Amino acid sequence: MGEGLGASTILTPASGRITSPGVHGCIVALLFRGARAAARLGGMSFRLKSILPRGLYGRTLLILIVPIVTIQLVVSIAFIQRHFERVTLQMTGGIAVELRLVLDRMAAGDRVGAEMVASELGFGLGPAAPPLEGLRYDALDLSGRVVAETLRDEVPGFLGADLTRESGRVIADFATPDGPVRVVIDRRRTSATNPHQLLVLMIVTSAVMTLISYLFLRNQIAPIKRLAQAAEAFGKGQHIPYRPRGATEVRAAGAAFLDMRARIERSIESRTRMLSGVSHDLRTPLTRLKLGLSMLPEDDETDALLGDVAEMQRLVDEFLAFARGDATEETEAVDLPALLRRVADNAERGGQRVELRGCDGSLTLRLRPQAVTRAIENLLSNAARFGTRARLSLLVGERSARIVVEDDGPGIPMERRDEAVQPFARLDGARDPNRGGGVGLGLSIAADVARSHGGALRLGESEDLGGLKAELALAR
């Protein structure tokens, strides 16, 4: 015998023999096909997520409506259609028996008797000129096909049927020894009338129940939305009234939020009172030192001691500003461009060169003006300390307002920008954002102010000036 075919050999239709790449090749091919199928599924899933609703209302309604629509489709297709087809089959079968009786009379030559029987049975009987051919019924007629096919299969001599020529009538032609005859049958005798009533009733009932469910669902979701609004406002530094409502779980979440908010506020208030007391206690001996040094003769040593006291006073004030933050200030409606113009004017009066951009219009936001002013002044102070010029810009977006401070200084290396905004961070690189006697709190205070207004402080590199770019984002 000739050479046998191995397990990895494929026969072509031309009886040729092609050696396959082996088991490993098959596995690789299967994996490649599986990867392509997974990629297609992944792309489909991504497209599906892009069109699905994102809100809780939409997703809950989708969960509510999809099962109802699916049940309606299944019931309509699997039950209603079969039910009406069987009812139509039984009713048309009875009509077929009566038609056979009439046609048998005509086949026996008793045309008068056949016409009498047809009249008693409610049939219209007459000559067919020209006779029908085939079956005619509407595509949307659920039972028309069953009527026509039943007449064709159960009545001898069937020539054709038309269910579309006359509304509510079935016209059928049959062959007899005397020639083709036409029978007109009332459609109500062949199939159930108004088969759409059940569908209409089911759809209307489902719509009413869906509306009731939506109203109930809105009442259940409203407390969740109010909780989200209260939490979002608290994240922006605003305190809006909130009372837990709704289901037990929502009330529990609301009560937990209120407890958390109260604990945070008490913690901030306690820290502020403690630092205020410490600051007050330190200012008293500092004032006595100032008075004592002012009574001494003026010389280099006295001037140095006075400078040390002034530096201690500045450090105490900076510590207090960082600890207090903006906790003691209430939010109010502020024209942000006007606030930036005032800060720039104050900086220029202090001898700083500031270029102002994007602050010509008007934009009203709810914020803490003193805290925002302090944050911008810290950023401008850093820009003046390490550069020769500064730029203050306002960029307005749909969900945030960005205050950008740029300078032409050495900047901060990218790998140390996260460290620069930490409290008490003192960088030893080309740019220390808090040098010149600071304690590393300038950028930290700005970052805290941004977070308390629902935003963030981002550090980057200025494309035009080449120095540091500090972006203070505030939520709208």
Image (cartoon, helix red, strand yellow):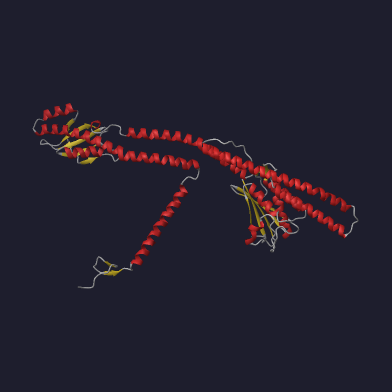
Q: Quarter of the image holding residue 25?
A: bottom left
Asked whether, in this view, residue 332 is left or right of residue 90, the answer is right
| Residue 352 position in % (x across, y down) | 75, 55
Along the line of sight, which residue is nearer the eye, 241 or 453?
A: 241
Using the image, determine if residue 329 lies above or below residue 385: above
Asked whether, in this view, residue 354 is left or right of residue 153, the answer is right
Q: Quarter of the image holding residue 40?
A: bottom left
Quarter of the image that includes the C terminus: top right
Residue that lies at the very extreme toward the left in this rendered image: 108
| Residue 165 position in % (x across, y down) | 25, 36
Using the image, determine if residue 184 lies above or below residue 464: above
Q: Residue at x 42, y 40 (%)?
A: 65
| Residue 189 position in % (x across, y down) | 23, 31
Q: How many marks?
A: 0
Residue that lies at the very extreme toward the right in this rendered image: 297
Along the line of sight, which residue is nearer the eye, 470 or 128?
A: 470
Asked whether, in this view, residue 247 is left or right of residue 277, the answer is left
Residue that lies at the very extreme toward the bottom in this rendered image: 2
Q: Residue at x 36, y 61 (%)?
A: 30
| Residue 345 position in % (x across, y down) | 74, 50
Question: Is residue 355 visible in this depiction of the protein?
Answer: no
Question: Is residue 324 visible in this depiction of the protein?
Answer: yes
Along the line of sight, which residue is nearer the eye, 181 or 58?
A: 58
